Image (spheres, rainbow, N blue to C red):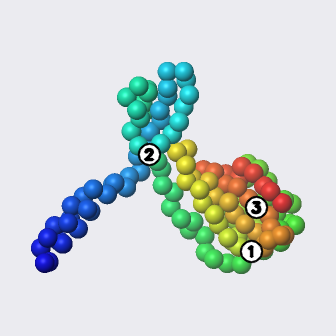
Amino acid sequence: MLIPRTIFMFVAALSLPATSNAAFKCESADGKVMFTDQPCPSNHKSESISIKKKEKSTYTSLPSNCSSDEVAEKVSIGMAEAKAYDACGYPDDINRTQTAYGVQEQWVYGTFPRSAYVYIEDGVVTSIQD
C-alpha cells in the first residue's frame, strides 16, 4: 500500500537530525574543554558558538607561476592572501578545513612528492611547508 509507506518515510525523515552551523563549547567542573555539535551535558558549563562560513575563493583558475621550490622565496608568513596569489598564482589544489575557530585553507603548489604548501587563515598566510 502506498499510504502506509508514505507515512513511514515521513516519520523516518522527521527522526533524522537537523544539520546546523551551531557548535557548543562545553567545560567540565575540572576545567576540561571540548567542542561539539551537540548540546553540552547538564553538568557542564555551556557556551553556544556560531561558525562562520567562508565563501569559496574568488580567484580564477589560472595556472600557478611558482614551482614548489619557489614558494618559500616568493611567499612569506604574515603576507595577505591576495599578495600570495599575486606572487605565485592559483595553486594546483586548495584544501579547506572548517573548525569551531574558522576556516583554514591549504594551498598546494606542485605535485607529490615535490609539493609546497601555503596555509591561510582569515586571509593571512600563517605557515609555509616545502
Q: Give the spatial CA distance, label 1 vs label 2.
A: 37 Å
Lower sequence index among marks 1 and 3: 1
Viewer can see residue 55 = yes
Farthest residue to the top: give it. Answer: 30
User: Dot 2: few (<14), some (14–19), or many (≥20) neighbours within 10 Å?
Assistant: some
Q: Which residue is mark 2?
A: 37
Lower sequence index among marks 3 and 2: 2
User: Dot 3: few (<14), some (14–19), or many (≥20) neighbours within 10 Å?
Assistant: many
Farthest residue to the front: give it. Answer: 1
Q: Are marks 3 and 2 in contact (CB under 8 Å)?
A: no
17 with respect to 122 (left or right): left
Q: Which residue is mark 1?
A: 64
Residue 101, position as x, y percentages in the image: 55, 44
Numbered disc 3: secondary structure: strand
Q: Residue at x 67, y 51 (%)?
A: 124
The C terminus, quarter of image:
bottom right
Q: Which residue is mark 3?
A: 117
Viewer can see residue 81 = no
The amino acid marked with disc number 1 is Ser
The amino acid marked with disc number 3 is Tyr
The N terminus, quarter of image:
bottom left
